[in-house]
Image (cartoon, helix red, strand yellow):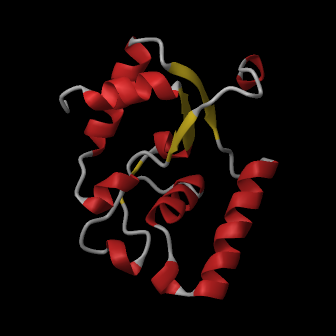
């Protein structure tokens, strides 16, 4: 549980796996990085964001508020991908006008938050890309 991690611990949090596909990065690459970090003891915790729990509801409300106020030119691929996954969307799904040509690849893993040890994440980033 996240409660087992000290409150003053430094963490790297990764979410919305699959959103990177909208930028031309193969999601398998991000998954391989997390797997390498986990293999070296750097995966500290994984937690799902659930749409009907408080954090999930607040996230959806926040994204909708920002979209309403800022307009489509300020939409975040990461936030839109996570929101779409929370609503059960999966596969190569355009989540905004900007992602029509290169959509993110959504899955249930898109709703997960991966908490990583920053030292191990840096060490793996310094390694040759998989």
**Near-viewer residue (90 or 119):** 119
Counting the numbered discs, the total is 0
Question: x%, y% of residue 51?
Answer: 69, 52
Residue 103, quarter of picture? bottom left
Image quarter hosting the N terminus: top right
The quadrant holding residue 30 is: top left
Q: Residue at x 42, y 28 (%)?
A: 121
Q: Nearer the viewer, residue 70 or 104?
A: 70
Whole-percent x, y for residue 116 in the image: 52, 28
Q: Give coordinates of residue 109: x percent, y percent.
A: 48, 39
Residue at the (56%, 87%) spot, across then down: 71
Up/down of 103 relative to 5, above or below: below
Q: Is residue 52 visible?
A: no
Compared with residue 4, is residue 20 higher up or lower down, i.e. above or below? below
Residue in the image at 73% along x and 68% along y: 61
Question: Outermost residue toward the right?
Answer: 54
**Residue 18 location in percent, x, y?**
38, 49
Towards the viewer: 67 or 119: 119
Query: Does residue 48 appear to the left or right of 120 in the view shown?
Result: right
Quarter of the view holding residue 40: top left
Q: Is residue 12 left or right of residue 27?
A: right
Q: Can you say whether 13 is above or below 95 in the image?
A: above
Work out which quarter of the rendered image holds the C terminus and state it: top left
Could you tell me which residue is drawn at 30 percent across and 44 percent down? 27
Can residue 7 be seen? yes
Q: Is residue 61 left or right of residue 79?
A: right
């Amino acid at each position: 549980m996240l409660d087992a991690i000290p409150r003053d611990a430094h963490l790297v949090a990764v979410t919305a796996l699959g959103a990177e596909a909208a930028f031309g990065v193969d999601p398998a690459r991000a998954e391989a990085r997390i797997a390498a970090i986990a293999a070296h003891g750097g995966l500290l915790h994984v937690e799902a964001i659930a749409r009907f729990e408080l954090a999930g509801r607040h996230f959806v409300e926040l994204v909708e508020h920002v979209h309403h106020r800022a307009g489509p030119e300020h939409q975040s691929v990461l936030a839109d991908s996570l929101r779409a996954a929370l609503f059960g969307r999966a596969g190569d799904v355009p989540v905004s006008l900007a992602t029509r040509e290169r959509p993110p690849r959504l899955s249930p893993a898109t709703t997960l938050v991966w908490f990583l040890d920053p030292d191990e994440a840096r060490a793996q980033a310094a390694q040759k890309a998989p």
